[in-house]
Image: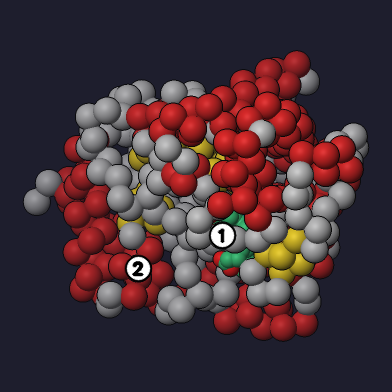
Amino acid sequence: MSDEFPPLKNDLILRAAWGQDTERAPVWVMRQAGRYLPEFRKLREKHDFFEICQTPELAKQITLQPIDRYPDLIDAAIIFSDILVIPQAMGMEVLMNPGPFFTKPLEVPEDVQNLQTEGVKERLQYVYDAIRLTRTQLLGRVPLIGFCGSPWTLMSYMIEGGASKTLQKSKTWLFKYPDQSKALLELITTACIAFLVGQAEAGAQLLQVFDSNGGDLSPHDFKEFSLPYSTRIAEGVREQLRQRGLQPVPLTLFAKGASPALAATAKYNTISLQWTVDPTDETIPKDVVLQGNLDPVVLYGGRDAIEREVKRVCAEFRAARPTGGWIANLGHGITPGVDPDDLKWFFECVHKYSVVNTIQE
Ligand SMILES: Cc1c2[nH]c(c1CCC(=O)O)Cc1[nH]c(c(CCC(=O)O)c1C)Cc1[nH]c(c(CCC(=O)O)c1C)Cc1[nH]c(c(C)c1CCC(=O)O)C2
């Protein structure tokens, strides 16, 4: 399997994800292939969002855009796709206009019976094809990240029908129909495990679970309705990779807004922190690798602010992980208005200030 693709020239992020010390922190950003890039917007004018996801050649082209624009500055690619491909593969229609829009969201627990839970892994074949093609054309420059949404975050989209500030409908399910909610979370968990294993089989070298709505739950409900399923994904993926004789793949959990100490109990190799978390927080266990966590809005603050904030964040992470185990990133996705040159400056600052002896000045 490993011979299928060109040899890897930059394994910084893999070493960091396994907890090893690195010369400097590896860096990538969530949503790095996205609307802040003029080359993305140009391609997007001609193609529907999910058409791009479903066309391996287009998904590959967009995945490579930031890698081509920032050569030697960026340490990972992330496959161009969306967390909502799982609900689609379960038979739900999802459009992007401009945010995600479900034409028939789940309204009552009986609606769950209409989901097509058999064959989900197979219907996502286009993602595996995109991953294979991208790995080939990356030419070993950097590792490729695969991903999925967490069961709770996907459940909330399937019920809300799109993004929501309050999550009133989906949280109502948790309080009104806790058992049926757990049954739905189980179904989604099974799909997530199969999908992540499929991505690793196709060549994804690191896997990230996005629990973007995890922090909208009380710690009690997070422990009841989100954490157990994210934990099961980590266990299930590791187990299935082992059974298939595949190399282990490092796993990252981004439980946005949730307590990092709780997120760490899910036993992922890495937890991704949003900017409201102090990486030196004593409650975070020392054996988990950290990813993050510059406030994405700093990228609008100009070069001096970017440099100052990167320097500060680098010092914090070095204090938190003196012997390595940090992947530099933003605390959430990069937003559409960022100047691509300011992102370049962010990468340059991370290269400079995450080297051990420069941050001790
Ligand atoms: C919640 C969520 C979604 N999708 C995703 C999440 C989890 C991360 C997070 O919390 O932001 C994950 C995602 N979405 C996308 C990626 C691609 C890889 C990457 O570059 O990170 C990834 C990893 C592409 C995308 N997904 C989307 C875009 C922009 C839409 C467009 O091109 O029209 C991109 C590049 C659209 C999308 N997709 C989703 C929303 C809420 C939106 C609209 C809001 C927004 O635009 O940021 C669902």
Is 154 above or below relative to 57?
Answer: above
- At x 39%, y 53%, the residue is 331
- At x 62%, y 51%, the residue is 169
As drawn, which residue projects farthest toward the left?
361
Sequence-wise, which precedes: disc 1 or disc 2? 1
Identity, as a three-letter code, of the amino acid under mark 2: Val
**x, y percent for residue 24:** 33, 46
Is 47 above or below relative to 248?
Answer: below
**x, y percent for residue 221:** 49, 32
Can you tell which quarter of the image residue 302 is in?
bottom left
- At x 83%, y 39%, the residue is 110
Instruction: From the viewer's perspective, tell me whether residue 265 is left or right of residue 359.
Output: right
Can the viewer see residue 144? Answer: no
Q: Quadrant of the N terminus?
A: top right
The residue pinned by badge 2 equals 297
Identity, as a three-letter code, of the amino acid under mark 1: Ser
Q: Residues within 10 Å of mark 1 (few under 14, many from 20)?
A: few
Q: Nearer the viewer, mark 1 or mark 2?
A: 1
Given residues 302 and 50, the one toward you in this image is 50
Instruction: From the viewer's perspective, tell me whether residue 155 is left or right of residue 33.
Output: right
Given residues 15 and 309, the one toward you in this image is 309
Q: Quadrant of ligand 1?
A: bottom right
Numbered-mark total: 2
Under 8 Å from ligand 1: the CB of mark 1? no
The residue pinned by badge 1 equals 164
**x, y percent for residue 164:** 56, 60
Q: Residues within 10 Å of mark 2 (few under 14, many from 20)?
A: some
- Disc 1 from disc 2: Cα separation: 21 Å
Instruction: From the viewer's perspective, tell me whether residue 161 is left or right of residue 315.
Output: right
